[in-house]
Amino acid sequence: MKARPYLVALVLLVLVAGLLVVFRTPGGDPAQQQRQGTSPRDAVEAGAGAGDAYYPTDGNSGYDVQLYDLAITYDPGSKQLDGVATVTATATADLARFNLDLEGLQVSAVQVGGQPAKFAQEGDHELVITPQAPIAKGRSFTAVVTYGGKPATIDDASLGRSGWQVSVTGGAFAAGQPHSATTWFPANDTPRDKAALKIAARVPDGWSVVSNGLEGGVTREGGWSTFRWQEDTPLATYLVTVAIDKWEIVRSQLPSGVPVVDAYAPGTSAGKKPIQARLPEVLGFLETKFGPYPQRAAGGIWIADQIGFSLETQTRPIYAAWADLETVVHENAHQWFGDSVTLQNWADICLNECLASYSQWLWDEHQGENLDDRYRREVDEKRGSSRFWSPKLYDMGQGNEFRGVYDKGIFALHALRKQVGDEVFFTALRSWTAQHRDGNASWPQFEDHFAKASGQQLDGFFTAWFHESGIPADQYLLPGALRR
């Protein structure tokens, strides 16, 4: 995510939570369940929360989602959304009951394994599901949830609006961090549970739909059009988007053959096409620093709204009306850092934002700027600014996740580069993205990775820059070639 300049020191969004999910029951009757090693007495109720210390009720335990298969209908006139979500997952415990996260929409029916299941909506976002029989650990299951209503928007005093938003052009789009998915479909809303995605979105003729991944066919019937998208590369729920408008669509390919789909809301194409046209150049440059482009599709969604951020929605970032070329660099660096390699906990947010922000400096260096001179000049300018140096960059505390990572984080990574040297720095970044591709990782793992790659004892460096507040001592502030 790249925040609008006046929102750079932002605090993280409110959290959602939940218990569990979905599935197809392994057999019909209790006797068969007992033969398979599970009985109602043995099974447990999956717990709310996936284990993130900052947001302990975020996501759910007891299962792992493989696929969200979504069929939605949205009428921009009435703002009504109706959906059927088919969730395929594997139980990681013997389960008697489980939850999904869903906010602001009403559920009318749930099936687990093709059989009606009991359900209740509790609190702000808990969809509690009780199948007819317990589900055995290791079993693959499906749950089908039918739901509808007018999707909610999340309002946060610091970050502004996120989740499902009605556009100034009359359409709608979903974007937000760390949450937006559960305002329009039921999900296990934690970055730890990445899954594939299929969407069939039905809208009145004249409107069109853009989402993540590869574009599918379009069917039209009775004054309605259904648009299909598919993303087979697992993605975190906050990186899922759907955007409805009267888009101007431009299709192309990267030199590698990766398909590119760019979408422009009414009134945006004249100013934004020249920026988006440089996407192949930007991705080609980023590949030289971070390794092969890790996604199967590319592009951008240019909305007409002055929201407070642009977001790295996987394969196809959403850009606010103010976004510029620097924003394109930032959001596409996230396709490596945040999308392909996804954080384990929100305390690890520097893995996303520090690295994407430093990519902006790398781009400026590519254009001819001397980063060492820039670094020394800006450090001198900010030496007396306690506000600039005070944020911690790792384990910064709930509500402080977006403080420091967009500016101090850039300095920290440039200092790390000078501490270990260019060859080690960029080789380690490329091996990091390769080793953790399509998975999750933590900041402590990143520190260990660089210590091993460099052969240096980096504890003091990482403590000064990432674990502590305040300006680092000169030995860490001006390492290597930065020391005059």
Image (cartoon, rainbow, N blue to C red):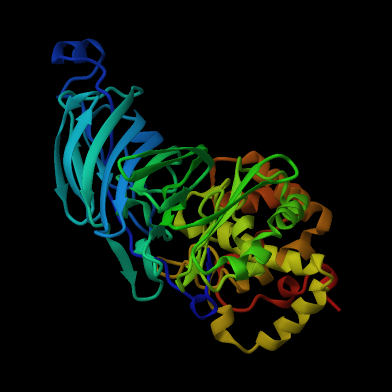
Q: Position of residue 457 (x, y in %)?
A: 72, 56
Query: Which residue appears at 63% of the width and 66% of the height?
Result: 357
Q: Position of residue 122 (x, y in %)?
A: 15, 50
Q: Nearer the viewer, residue 251 or 366?
A: 251
Above/below status of 257 relative to 450? above
Instruction: Name, please, the residue furthest toward the front.
Output: 222
- Corner quadrant of residue 281: bottom right
Q: Nearer the viewer, residue 263 or 221?
A: 221
Q: Position of residue 170 (x, y in %)?
A: 36, 65
State the count of labels.
Answer: 0
Query: Which residue appears at 45% of the width and 58% of the height?
Result: 246
Q: Is residue 149 left or right of residue 386?
A: left
- Corner quadrant of residue 466: bottom right
Q: Is residue 291 left or right of residue 86?
A: right
- Corner quadrant of residue 135: top left
Q: Is residue 289 left or right of residue 6?
A: right
Q: Position of residue 263 (x, y in %)?
A: 54, 56
Q: Is residue 217 left or right of residue 408?
A: left
Query: Which residue appears at 31% of the width and 26% of the height?
Result: 141
Task: Quarter of the image for the C terminus: give it.
Answer: bottom right
| Residue 217 visible, this angle | yes
| Residue 464 visible, this angle | no
Query: Which residue appears at 57% of the width and 58% of the height?
Result: 352
